[in-house]
Image (cartoon, rainbow, N blue to C red):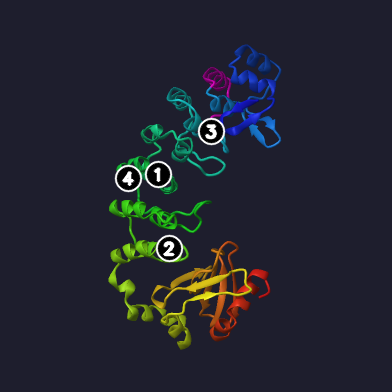
Amino acid sequence: MIKLKDIGNFKTIPEILSDIINQNISKLDEHLAKAWDINKNISISEYTNLSPLDCALIMEAFESVKWLVEHGADLNTKDRPSFLTAIRYCDEKIIQYLVSHGAKVNLTNNVKSDAFMEAIYGKNYKYLQLIHDLGHTVEKYGGKAFREAVSDRNYDVLKFFISNGLDINYNEADMVYPFKPTPLCVAARYVDLDMCKFLVENGADVTLTEKDGMRPYSIALEKGDIEMAEYFKSLEPSEYHNLQNKLDELKTFKLPKVLIEFLQGNKLHFKLDDCDFKWIEFFSLIDTIPMKAGRQKLLRLSKATGDYEDIHIVWNPKTKKIAFYDMEHKELKDITDFVDFIENISSYMQKIVEGDL
């Protein structure tokens, strides 16, 4: 069995790949003489295809790396730039060799990962400073990797980014975080109070919201962590928790009086019999979340809907109906008026699951 680091284990590999790994330069010369395309991927298995340079870098076959570069291997391919592969798998001499021969440091790969993220994925934290010094700076490029690193709880890595000018409130959308959370929102979603406090102490803004209106305090409520919610509440402006301010904010939503009274009551948790959701809990009025679905203004009412975390019960002011919004599929559908919904809540929630609305 042949192991190609974290790429996988293979019973057999192509001869040309073996020659690259074993740094058999004379054999590589022979392959080239037979019109071998050194930029064409090598098929290793049904689902694994790598360029010759990828293979040499992953296995740290430096002599093969140099041979390939000298014979015109593309260092800056769109899907797997050589600098990123080297950061993840190689020692510094190979990294510096590639840069000196034209490898670009600011590229991303096919999954939009950059050099900082590859260093973190490969646990090559020692290269973070090198990446920064080579021109892929923390201030300009570090936000995405920092946000990813929050879940790893590696405080030394986080301190590196912070000390080099990171925007600690970075909240750009990407494939992992399309809802535009700050690192603090990510830490809150992991219910990591120590991390939250660390970020706040280093300048994180507790009032910044995600795309759907959720802020760290709201996330803590959603997660049911009262200690974390109280911590964030203590840091927020007092007007955020003033009932009259909230009522003024909600005037444009045209909430019926019965809904306002319900959200100020004590019965906000419902066990749902004969329903896949099992249960639902609503925010109190003051904690409801203004949000948008496209251009449509909505008010999120549900704090949690059982195990279906992507389904939110909302108030649709345009139709004056209770509706549900599917975050994953970006789907908004009206259900009924509030009184009818509450009286038949189990039935309507099950219809959401079954697609009967």
Residue 68 drawn at (x, y percent): 57, 21
The residue depicted at 59 percent of the width and 28 percent of the height is 4
Q: Which residue is mark 1?
A: 142
User: Which residue matches tag 2?
Assistant: 219
Mark 3 vs mark 2: which is more N-terminal?
A: 3
Under mark 3, the amino acid is Asn
| Label 1: element kind | loop
Q: Rounded to the nearest whole Å, what is the CA distance between mark 4 and mark 2?
A: 24 Å
| Residue depicted at 59% across the width and 21% down the height | 21
Mark 1 and mark 2: Cα distance apart in space:
25 Å
First to last magenta residue range:
61-76
Q: Is residue 355 above or below residue 7?
A: below
Q: Amino acid type of disc 4?
A: Ile
Q: Tag 2 or tag 1, which sits nearer the N-term?
A: 1
In which quadrant will I find the C terminus? bottom right
Name the element at disc 3. loop
Residue 76 bears which disc, if any?
3
Quick check: is 109 in the magenta stretch? Answer: no
- Image quadrant where one finds the N terminus: top right
